[in-house]
Amino acid sequence: PPPKPPSPPSPTLFTLSRYPLCAILSYLTEQEGIIACSTCTFSRKKILPLFKLPTILMVVNDSARVEKYRFRECPCQDASVLLARVNTRRLKGRLLLLSQQQQQQQHLKHL
């Protein structure tokens, strides 16, 4: 029999794009989110800093700053989604402009 093709790697939480990942992590508490994001070096270095609170909001315990994280949905989405929205708005504007020009031309023909 022919050899069996290799199965694709199973998707992990961190193969998601930023917006779905934020939506999933928003259900976690701070400790659960830190534990989930500390499981591999990539997520600890690239994903966890996205949720870090500003220095002003850090808790000071015995003159040592404790980093705080807030896991919530980010209002902005991936660059590809934002670009698609911009292109859609531009296309809508072009179509409106074209329809207005056509209406003006038809109006001038009737005069």
Image (cartoon, rainbow, N blue to C red):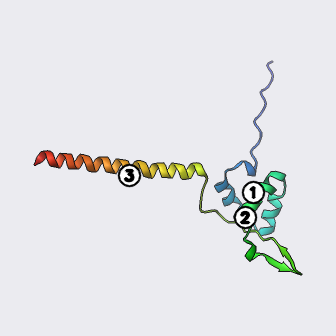
Viewer-side residue, 52 vs 16: 52
Q: Residue flagged by tag 1: what amino acid is it?
A: Ile
Residue 64 placement, left or right of 71: right
Q: Name the image quarter holding residue 75.
A: bottom right
Q: Position of residue 96 (x, y in %)?
A: 33, 51
Is the residue under label 2 in contact with that under label 1 (CB below 8 Å)? Answer: yes
Numbered label attached to residue 51:
2
Q: Is residue 73 shown left or right of residue 100?
A: right
Question: Which amino acid does the dot numbered 3 rest on?
Answer: Gly
In the image, residue 4 sits, relative to residue 97, either above or below, namely above
Identify the mark nearer the N-term, 2 or 3. 2
Residue wearing tag 3: 93
Q: Could you tell me which residue is drawn at 44 percent across and 52 percent down? A: 89
Q: Secondary structure at mark 1?
A: helix
Residue that mark 1 sits on: 47
CA separation in Å, label 2 and label 3? 36 Å
